[in-house]
């Protein structure tokens, strides 16, 4: 009895210890969004949970509409905002979020009767550097990944509509922009069930849609949040296809480089292909067939393997998380179907376990080696603290600070809620609010200012035309209403040189290392 309880508890404890170790080993700057999310949760804790207005972004559709597409995630983070040191709050919140994701993977693998579910969960955690790295970020995507797997299991196993409703409600409540993912998963499962099980699972899909709708409206300014989600998903995709001048984080770029193929796509693909080939050989040799539900499961996972693989390779590295999860599940299912045969299991148990442990070690060492390179390039955890605190002490409340780079916002907002900024989180939010202003900002951000007789110009059209040209001073002072401009000279040397030499701008703050500078717009 005690042994059985230990067998149930120990894997869960081990996953928690694993999450805690890496959460405290890695710095809080694993993903700059961590800083924004914990601070926004703190805003709800200190100013009320039912006001999603976000006035800190002056030129963003988020500031204009006041919706919060991550509302549920921010509500879940509120307990961690009671730490006096919010950096410590980030650490503890990361432990819980990462653990919940790994726990969900382990439980679902176990429910699918996967042989050695704990080992497959560990393998998933270390299988791909980018995925491992993102699993250690304090972001809603981590929980969305877990909920997507749970929804997939509930649909495949035809569990009660109540559970499907709860899981889908949580998915859209936590991250409304990704509610299309459960719909995609449900569609694939629905088609595969019709093909192999000759049945239409209408009822459970209705529960899923009801849950997604309920989770979407379970927030203040629900309509505004839906509009922002549309902008982040649909409009962003369309603008990318139209080659709009939008800058993205690395994870929103295609994963089509040679290094990504070698270290992320190829290893997992070889394991998946080997597992499927092994399953086919086993079925032919034993002259047996898959059950209908197993056919649905395998065919759904193969579809996801192909579908998310294409999305990963062609559109965004971030989809690697889903692709890897369903790829590992596909390999685990194929492996476990073969090992249901007692004769095969006893014959190959030792060698299979040996190979499995070697694979986990090899993948783990390689993942941690690459991730160590990522860590060496991370900014310090007190990034922009000095200029942010100077602004709090020396500017008027609500004064607009022109953050030259959109990715400055998370750090600046974490340290300073006294001022307002231009944009943050994603450039598409500024672009959708006012394209002309976005482009004026864009040319400054990429350090492409036109210099004529000592005067600097930016442009509100692309391609630029005479009527859309304005001086940098006029743009900042009259169009953006900025009182200050924040610049990193190393990233914007041309802009910095102009500001430092122009009479309309007064350098009011400069860090000792000269990496962060504030100018007052006179």
Image (spheres, rainbow, N blue to C red):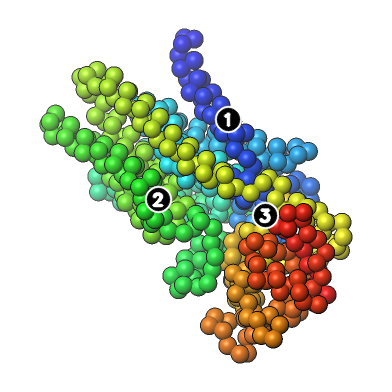
**Residue 118 drawn above or below residue 390:** above
State the residue at coordinates (51%, 24%): 14
Q: Are marks 2 and 1 in contact (CB under 8 Å)?
A: no
Q: Are marks 3 and 2 in contact (CB under 8 Å)?
A: no
Q: Position of residue 202 (x, y in %)?
A: 38, 50
Residue 314 horizontal side relative to residue 136, left or right? left
Q: Position of residue 250 (x, y in %)?
A: 51, 56
Marks 3 and 1 sit apart, C-alpha to C-alpha, by: 25 Å
Q: Position of residue 121 (x, y in %)?
A: 43, 32
**Residue 394 drawn above or below residue 458:** above
Of residue 499 and residue 422, the one placed in the foreground of this image is: 499
State the residue at coordinates (28%, 41%): 270
Marks 2 and 1 sit apart, C-alpha to C-alpha, by: 26 Å
- The mark that comes first in sequence, 3 or 2, is 2
Q: Secondary structure at mark 3?
A: helix
- The mark that comes first in sequence, 2 or 1, is 1
Q: Is disc 2 surrounded by few (<14), some (14 to 19) or many (20+) residues within 10 Å?
A: some
Q: Quadrant of the C terminus?
A: bottom right
Residue 21 marker: 1
State the residue at coordinates (74%, 78%): 473
**Residue 403 drawn above or below residue 18:** below
Residue that mark 2 sits on: 260
Q: Is residue 318 visible?
A: yes
Q: Quadrant of residue 293?
A: top left
State the residue at coordinates (67%, 71%): 495
Q: Quadrant of residue 290?
A: top left
- The mark that comes first in sequence, 3 or 1, is 1
Q: Secondary structure at mark 1?
A: helix
Residue 394 horizontal side relative to residue 21, left or right? right
Q: Is disc 1 surrounded by few (<14), some (14 to 19) or many (20+) residues within 10 Å?
A: few
Residue that mark 3 sits on: 410
């Amino acid at each position: 009895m005690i042994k059985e309880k230990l067998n149930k508890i120990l894997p869960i404890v081990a996953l928690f210890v694993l999450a805690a170790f890496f959460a405290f080993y890695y710095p809080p700057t694993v993903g700059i969004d961590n800083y924004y999310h914990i601070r926004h949760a703190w805003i709800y804790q200190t100013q009320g949970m039912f006001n999603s207005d976000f006035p800190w972004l002056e030129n963003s559709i988020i500031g204009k509409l006041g919706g919060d597409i991550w509302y549920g995630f921010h509500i879940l983070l509120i307990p961690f905002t009671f730490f006096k040191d919010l950096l410590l709050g980030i650490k503890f919140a990361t432990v819980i979020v990462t653990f919940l994701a790994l726990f969900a993977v382990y439980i679902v693998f176990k429910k699918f009767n996967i042989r050695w579910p704990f080992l497959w969960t560990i393998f998933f955690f270390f299988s791909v550097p980018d995925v491992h790295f993102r699993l250690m970020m304090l972001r809603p995507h981590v929980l969305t990944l877990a909920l997507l797997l749970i929804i997939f299991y509930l649909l495949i196993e035809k569990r009660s509509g109540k559970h499907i409703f709860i899981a889908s409600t949580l998915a859209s409540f936590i991250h409304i922009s990704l509610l299309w993912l459960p719909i995609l998963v449900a569609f694939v499962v629905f088609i595969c069930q019709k093909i192999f099980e000759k049945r239409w699972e209408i009822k459970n899909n209705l529960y899923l849609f009801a849950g997604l709708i309920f989770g979407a409206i379970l927030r203040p300014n629900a309509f505004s949040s839906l509009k922002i989600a549309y902008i982040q998903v649909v409009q962003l995709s369309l603008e990318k296809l139209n080659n709009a001048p939008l800058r993205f984080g690395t994870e929103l770029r295609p994963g089509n480089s040679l290094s990504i193929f070698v270290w992320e796509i190829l290893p997992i693909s070889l394991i998946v292909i080997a597992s499927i080939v092994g399953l086919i050989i086993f079925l032919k040799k034993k002259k047996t067939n898959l059950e209908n539900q197993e056919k649905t499961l395998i065919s759904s996972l193969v579809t996801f393997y192909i579908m998310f693989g294409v999305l990963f390779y062609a559109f965004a590295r971030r989809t690697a998380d889903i692709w890897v999860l369903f790829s590992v599940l596909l390999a685990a299912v194929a492996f476990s179907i073969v090992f249901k045969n007692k004769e095969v299991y006893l014959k190959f148990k030792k060698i299979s376990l040996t190979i499995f442990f070697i694979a986990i070690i090899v993948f783990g060492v390689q993942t941690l080696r690459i991730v160590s390179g990522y860590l060496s390039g991370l900014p310090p955890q007190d990034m922009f603290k000095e200029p942010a605190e100077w602004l709090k002490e020396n500017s008027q409340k609500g004064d607009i600070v022109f953050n030259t780079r959109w990715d400055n916002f998370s750090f600046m907002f974490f340290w300073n809620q006294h001022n307002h900024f231009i944009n943050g989180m994603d450039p598409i939010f500024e672009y959708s609010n006012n394209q002309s202003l976005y482009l004026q900002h864009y040319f400054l951000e990429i350090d492409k200012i036109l210099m004529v007789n000592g005067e600097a110009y930016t442009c509100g059209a692309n391609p630029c035309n005479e009527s859309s040209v304005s001086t940098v001073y006029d743009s900042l002072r009259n169009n953006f209403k900025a009182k200050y401009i924040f610049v990193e000279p190393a990233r914007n040397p041309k802009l910095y040189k102009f500001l430092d030499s122009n009479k309309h701008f007064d350098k009011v703050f400069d860090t000792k290392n000269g990496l962060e500078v504030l100018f007052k717009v006179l």
